[in-house]
Image (cartoon, helix red, strand yellow):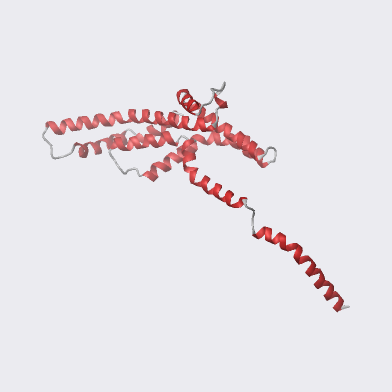
Amino acid sequence: MNQIGVCLLAVKTTATVPLTLPDLGAKLHPGDSTPWAILFVLTLITLLPAILMAMSPMVRLMVVFHFLRQALGTQTAPSNPTLLGLALMMSWFLMAPVLNQVDQTAVEPFRSGQISGWTAIDNGSGVVKHFLLHYAREKDLALFTSAAQMERPARADDLPMRVVMPAYMLSELKAGFAIGAVLYLPFLLIDMVVASITTSIGMFQLPPVVVSTPLKILLFVIVDGWNLLANSLLHSF
């Protein structure tokens, strides 16, 4: 009886092995779509910084911070990582209501199985588009609508993201340059006063920027410039 049981077990094992080989091969050799999915994910990760810049207030913040550093005359202080980190945190703070709305309208319904993935993407992108349209100028929207050879829609919400995003970036660049120009004027006045004083007393060997830079930094610290600048930028949105 033991020999019969061993034989039956061997026959059963031999019969089941060929049936499992195709399944094993399918697991070991993925489908042809896997390389394309990996390529898409890697491309998305590469473009993520640009997407973040194009859909957040970071454009305006970075332009203003650059003008401030040039106006102060400090070429490397604060450093680029410091300014980038500050702009990122302020952008996160400003985008918090938008992210919460995206979570309520797209992420949570998708997790609970109420909507599909594409519907969640449409709902989330609609919320972000509404935020971008709030700060995009009509002139810039009309520019990219004409460049895309599209008919002007009845509502701005009907515009695609490929029109809204560049229009928003142009509007943010204009706003950043306007704030930076106003921010630059007081420090330019200090440079002119220091240059006229050093020239009038005959200090030709000493560059005026050597004297004006400490004065500008001292003035910026006395008036608590970082707090005023952050307050102005937050209230500009």
Q: What residue appears at the point 29 percent right and 35 percent down from the top-left corner?
A: 71
Between residue 141 and residue 61, name the one nearer to us: 141
Residue pushed farthest left? 202
Name the spot of residue 76 as percent of width and height, x first: 31, 44
Name the spot of residue 101 as percent of width and height, x first: 58, 34
Left or right of 193 in this view: 6: right
Based on the displayed image, in which of its 4 quarters is residue 70 positioned?
top left
Residue pushed farthest front? 149
Based on the displayed image, in which of its 4 quarters is residue 194 positioned?
top left
Left or right of 202 in this view: 42: right
Left or right of 164 in this view: 8: right
Quadrant containing the N terminus is bottom right
Numbered marks: total: 0
Name the spot of residue 146 as percent of width and height, x first: 48, 25
Q: Say above or below: 61 vs 141.
A: below
Q: What residue appears at the point 78 percent right and 69 percent down from the top-left corner?
A: 14
Q: Say above or below: 4 vs 45.
A: below
Residue pushed farthest right? 1
Q: Say above or below: 141 vs 19.
A: above
Between residue 121 and residue 190, name the one nearer to us: 121
Name the spot of residue 29 as percent of width and height, x first: 64, 58
Based on the displayed image, in which of its 4 quarters is residue 26 positioned?
bottom right
Q: What residue appears at the point 41 percent right and 42 percent down from the top-left corner?
A: 84
